[in-house]
Image (cartoon, grey):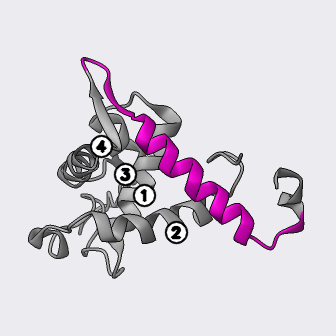
Amino acid sequence: MATMYDVPADDLIEALADDLEERLEEPEWAQFTKSGVDRELPPEQEDFWAVRAASLLRKVADRGPVGVERLATEYGGAKDGSNRYQVAPDKRSDGSRNLIRTILQQLEEEDLVETADGEGRRITPAGRSLLDDTAGTVLEELDRPELERYA
């Protein structure tokens, strides 16, 4: 049986996003909001909400229990430090906590993630099952010789 560690993360997230796109509803405000302070524009991907949800589900399964603060740090980036008169180095900034929190709440409603008191969020058995089933499907569809030993 394949697990989420047996397949490349990009392929797993893409397959999970296809499944979660039908299950999760993107809020109206999501098309206007940036994904972090360091960004200039909102995301341009059509399925951004589903891809971020799939990525968050994988991160919670890998690093859980994990809180919104740590996840915001992982989705952050470098914010320009320059201004008109002097050049300053880039500063580190976090990703949007509201975006992450809203997606995690939707994943909780789908019973894929649960809240651990005082620890953050962790994956449920249903969430682990979804990840492993999707990983098995992705592994069968992959045409990469270096991954044949896992099949």
Q: Earlier in the sequence, mark 4 or mark 2?
A: 2
In the rendered view, would you say 73 is above or below 38? Answer: above
Given residues 136 and 79, the one toward you in this image is 136
Q: Which of marks 4 and 2 is in front?
A: 4
Question: Disc 4 designates what residue?
Answer: 111
Q: Which of marks 3 and 1 is nearer the N terminus?
A: 1
Q: Which amino acid does label 2 sit on?
A: Glu
Determine contact: label 4, label 2, CB under 8 Å: no
Q: Which residue does the image show at 57% across and 53% down from the upper left?
A: 133
Query: Is residue 128 rendered to the left or right of residue 147?
Result: left
Q: Which amino acid does label 3 sit on?
A: Gly
Any part of residue 60 in sight: no
Q: Position of residue 44 (x, y in %)?
A: 32, 81
Q: Residue 122 carries which label?
A: none
Q: Which amino acid does label 1 sit on?
A: Ala
Q: Where is residue 16 in the image (x, y as percent from the top left)?
A: 48, 62
Question: Disc 1 designates what residue?
Answer: 54
Q: Which of marks 4 and 3 is nearer the N terminus?
A: 3
Given residues 117 and 85, the one toward you in this image is 117
Q: Which residue does the image show at 44% across and 31% down from the upper left?
A: 64
Residue 16 among those drawn in magenta:
no
Q: Residue 76 carries which label?
A: 3
Q: Which mark is residue 14?
A: 2
* Distance (Cα) linking label 4 and label 2: 20 Å
